[in-house]
Image (spheres, helix red, strand yellow):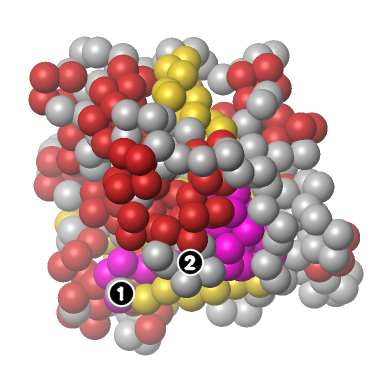
Amino acid sequence: MAFPPLVEPVAELSDAERTRTARHRVLSGFGDVAQRRLAAAHVAVVGAGGLGSPVVLALAAAGVGTLTVIDDDVVEASNLQRQLMHRVRDVGAAKVDSAVRIAGDLSPTTVVHPLPARLTPDNARDLLAGAHVVIDGTDTFQTRETVAAACEELGVPLVWGVVQEFHAQATVFWSAPPAGADPVRLIDLYPPDAAREAPTCAQVGVLGALCLQVGSILATEAIKLITGVGEPLLGRVLVIDALRARTDEVPLRAVASAAPAADSPVVVAPGSPARDRGPTASPVPATPAPAGAIPQLTPAQTLAAQREGAVLVDVREPFETAHGVIPGSVLRPLADLLAEPAGIGAQRVVVVCQVGARAHRAAAALRGAGVEASVLAGGIEAWARGTAVPAVRA
């Protein structure tokens, strides 16, 4: 459903701004009024990295009047593959400084408030107060919970996205939406603490180009909310699989209205769409598992399975396995295994990766090829903590 616009328009645009935004103002259903609403809008962007970069670029170019950009990090060389707001010369400088520069280059009328601060439960409400819309582009779940809690308290819509490996999700949370719409919160997608052990991009990687796609979606959602044009993603989760060039939409309802029957627990494999409560990218094992779910083994269970004849398949990259593998493992990088899962030549397999996310994808492919596949929950990192058998050099 379409919502009323969040922002009252400014009285008029300057001649230069009318010229700069001319292609917006001729859009059917958008026009001059919507553009003037953007000029009056204040958007808070939490995170100036892979998602925050395209968000800042898109919103500044769109003519949003005020951007508050919150990030306490500095630019590193490894950021440049996906965080396209930054340049080589910015390495070592505050990320929020890039936002000021890039917005000024695109839109002289956009005011950027750079806040090189870490958002915490103590300061989140104050830092986000005054924004019409908040966009979360952070990379830790603890911070996401903090942002969501502050937005719920303020009653501000939260445009939310996450990218990992080749996959992404995007949605809108809003604790106080307009009449006729049901509130949807982060807790409706991820129960408390459900994703606290999710791997970071540093551990499993992320496709840089996908960050641009998702950042553009987040910026578009903010523009729709500000102007009242189109239907926001409230109550829907966009799920993107870049490898298959596929975009799916999953309904998302409040927990109270989506509670399953007591004899039918909702258990979702990582990265799979949950039709009752939404998708999850969390590697945290859920129990009990329904028929067809990929079994997750502890280090002790993995060792026992290996002794009983199961083949351990390590799907990490060579630069990772060079630091150590479980003795007796077969090394098969994920892309190679996905290209030919039946070629593994074993009937029973336990898949290993760094923390578990890639192993689930591999196990799903193996099971599709008729192989009895399970996963070492928590990956090689869990093995190092949970068994006395040391990893050996590949």
Q: Is residue 232 left or right of residue 96?
A: right
Residue type (three-letter) at the residue carrying disc 2: Val
How many neighbours does mark 1 have within 10 angstroms: few (below 14), some (14-19), or many (20 or more)?
Answer: few
Which is more toward the observer, 40 or 375?
Answer: 40
Residue 239, numbered circle: 2
Where does the C terminus fall, quadrant-wise? top left
- x%, y% of residue 240? 41, 66
- Mark 1 or 2, nearer chain start: 2
The stretch in magenta equals: 222-244
**Residue 349 screen position, x and y as percent:** 35, 68
The secondary structure type at the circle numbered 2 is: strand
Task: Give the numbered dot on residue 245.
Answer: 1
Query: Which secondary structure lies at badge 1?
Result: loop
Decide: marks 1, 2 in contact (CB < 8 A)? no
**Above or below, 68 relative to 366:** above
C-alpha distance separating marks 1 and 2: 11 Å
The disc label shown at residue 135, or none: none
Which residue is found at the position 66% from the left and 43% from the top?
8
- Residue depicted at 37% across the width and 76% down the height: 246
Q: Going 18% across and 34% down the picture, which residue do you hit?
A: 80
Spot occupied by residue 375 in the image (x, y as percentages of width and height): 43, 60
